[in-house]
Amino acid sequence: IKHLMKNQGLQKTTGYSTVENNSKTFKFVNQDRSHINTSLIYDVLYIISRKISEDIYIHSLTKLRPLDLIRKRSTAPECHSVRLAICFGLISVSLGNPVLVRKNIRICEACHGAAKKISEVTGREIVVGDPKMYHHFRNGRCSCGDYW
């Protein structure tokens, strides 16, 4: 398939997520390390992943943790743009306000499940808008009823 796409000049759409804060838009791609607060974002991602009982396959820019593994594939859901955007939103959006994330492609099933758990353990409302619908995550549940 990739060979056929290349021969016909077709390219996959690069997935990204955006978060708006203080009238500024912040863009994240999978395994993004370009943000000024990258170290803090990945530390929050590590903590959140442990709280929602997920195995995490990332390493911090500042220190390696004993159980950290580096996964070579950019498709590792632990570092998908939506999770990075949610973590940035958790640290930058004031308490009481929902974390609003917009995606240019559909949210994957792994990130959808993670967003539900993140909303439950943090007590925050998370809204992820993808091209099909807006997913409102609150108290471990999604407005789509897990059907999208």
Image: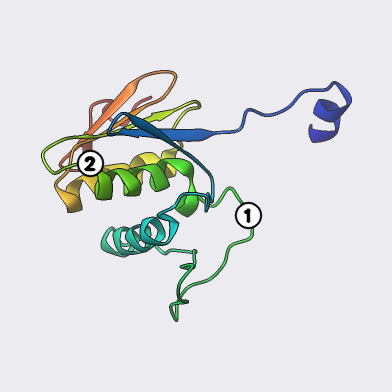
Label 1 Cα neighbours within 10 Å, binned few <14 / some 14-19 / many ≥20: few
Q: Considering only order in the chain, which callout, 1 or 2, is on the residue closer to the N terminus?
A: 1
Answer with the quarter of the image where residue 50 lies. bottom left
Name the residue type under label 2.
Answer: Val
Q: Residue furthest right?
A: 7
- Residue 93's disc is 2
**Residue at (73, 27) in percent of width and height:** 11
Q: Percent position (x, y) of residue 94? A: 17, 42
**Residue at (52, 50) in percent of width and height:** 34
**Residue at (14, 47) in percent of width and height:** 123
Q: Is residue 13 left or right of residue 85?
A: right
Q: Residue furthest bottom?
A: 66
Quadrant into which the N terminus falls:
top right
**Residue at (31, 62) in percent of width and height:** 53
Where is 17 relative to 89, above or below?
above
Q: Is residue 122 left or right of residue 12?
A: left
In the rendered view, how is the structure colored? Answer: rainbow
Q: Is residue 4 left or right of residue 43?
A: right
- Disc 1 secondary structure class: loop
Q: Nearer the viewer, residue 46 or 145?
A: 46
Answer with the quarter of the image where residue 54 lies. bottom left
Q: Which residue is mark 1?
A: 73
Where is 147 relative to 38, above or below?
above
Q: Percent position (x, y) of residue 17? A: 45, 34
Q: Percent position (x, y) of residue 66? A: 45, 81
Q: Nearer the viewer, residue 95 or 140?
A: 95
Q: Percent position (x, y) of residue 63? A: 45, 76
Residues at marks 2 and 1 touching, judged by CB atoms closer than 8 Å = no
